[in-house]
Image (cartoon, rainbow, N blue to C red):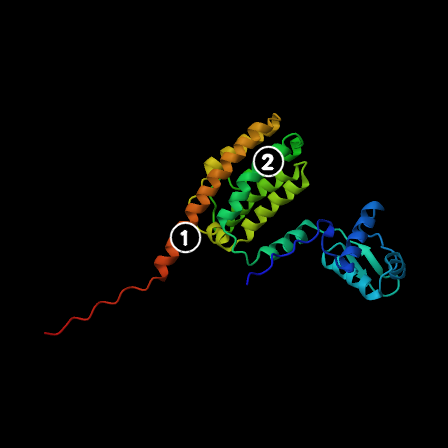
Amino acid sequence: MSLPDPIDPPASAGPPRRKRTDEIVDAIKRMIVEHGLGPGDRLPQERDLLAQFAASKGTVREALKALEVQGLISVRTGPGGGAFIERMSEGRAMSLLSNFLFAKNLSIANIYQMRKALEPLVAASATPHIDEAGLKRLEAIISIYDHEPADARERWNQRMAELDFHGVVAEYSDNPILAFTARFLQRLLKDLTIAQDIYVQPEPVLREGGIRHQRDLIAAMRRRDADAASAILAEHMAEAEAHMLRLETRLEDRFLSETEEPRKPRARRRA
């Protein structure tokens, strides 16, 4: 006997009903924006929120707790207490995203796939807005790694400064989502274990090529040539990816050779 065909839901069914707590969270977020509330401002008292949303005390407190976990408010107890608007720092936002990606087995290739797509856009969007002070900052950063390091500490600082160069470029982008994502990818490289292992190795780096690209970028930005800035960063990212992947392969091969057990000599057979 054949089974009946599944019954399609009516077109007018709409999305599933959301939790009341989530609705209140969204409503409070809209309230913050519509009333222009900023860090340090207080939300309405709990009794007012209960009346406004016609919700139970437990539901409102759950919504406030969710906003606090998200870093948008802080709840203080005692005299003068209440729920206060907080400014979520970029570092906290990146930490939350990093926690989400913790078990995703990120690779250098994953990160550079994104960097190759985004860094040229960041450079182009920053070019019309960067000022002479910003360009001077970029030149000062290059001076940190335009020479061979004296020791392991300086080598590490140079690798971090190379990433900081791109963070400064992102500061001048007029697209906050693009700038944040670019800086987040730079932070992932700083935190990624395999990348850290590469950065501490006394391996030769493509210093001359990378610095040439960066100085060409500064020149393009100074003359407000966004297309040139984008092309320079595209080439720079492609070369940086290839170099990092080569170092990753070399490091993994070295690890395997060091952990391989030497073969034991075969016992000589007696006649």
Residue 226, label in figure: none
Q: Residue at x 62, y 26 (%)?
A: 224
Q: Residue at x 57, y 57 (%)?
A: 102
Residue 26 to residue 142: above or below: below
Q: In the displayed structure, does residue 225 sit left or right of residue 29?
A: left
The answer to whether one can see residue 232 in this image is yes
Q: In which quarter of the image is residue 4?
A: bottom right
Q: In the displayed structure, does residue 82 sit left or right of residue 227?
A: right
Q: Quadrant of residue 182?
A: top right
Residue 39: x, y in percent? 80, 50
Residue 147: x, y in percent? 48, 40
Residue 54 to residue 236: above or below: below
Residue 121, label in figure: 2
Amino acid under disc 2: Leu
Residue 66: x, y in percent? 74, 59
Q: Please identify, in this view, whether the residue under mark 1 or under mark 2 is nearer the observer.
A: 2
Amino acid under disc 1: Leu
| In front of the other: 201 or 62 | 62
Q: How crowded is mark 2: few (under 14 residues within 10 Å), some or many (20 or more)?
A: many
| Secondary structure at numbered mark 2 | helix
Residue 251, label in figure: 1
| In front of the other: 131 or 58 | 58
- What is the residue that sits farthest to the front in this orientation? 1
Spatial separation of the CA atoms under disc 1 and disc 2: 31 Å
Q: Quadrant of the C terminus?
A: bottom left
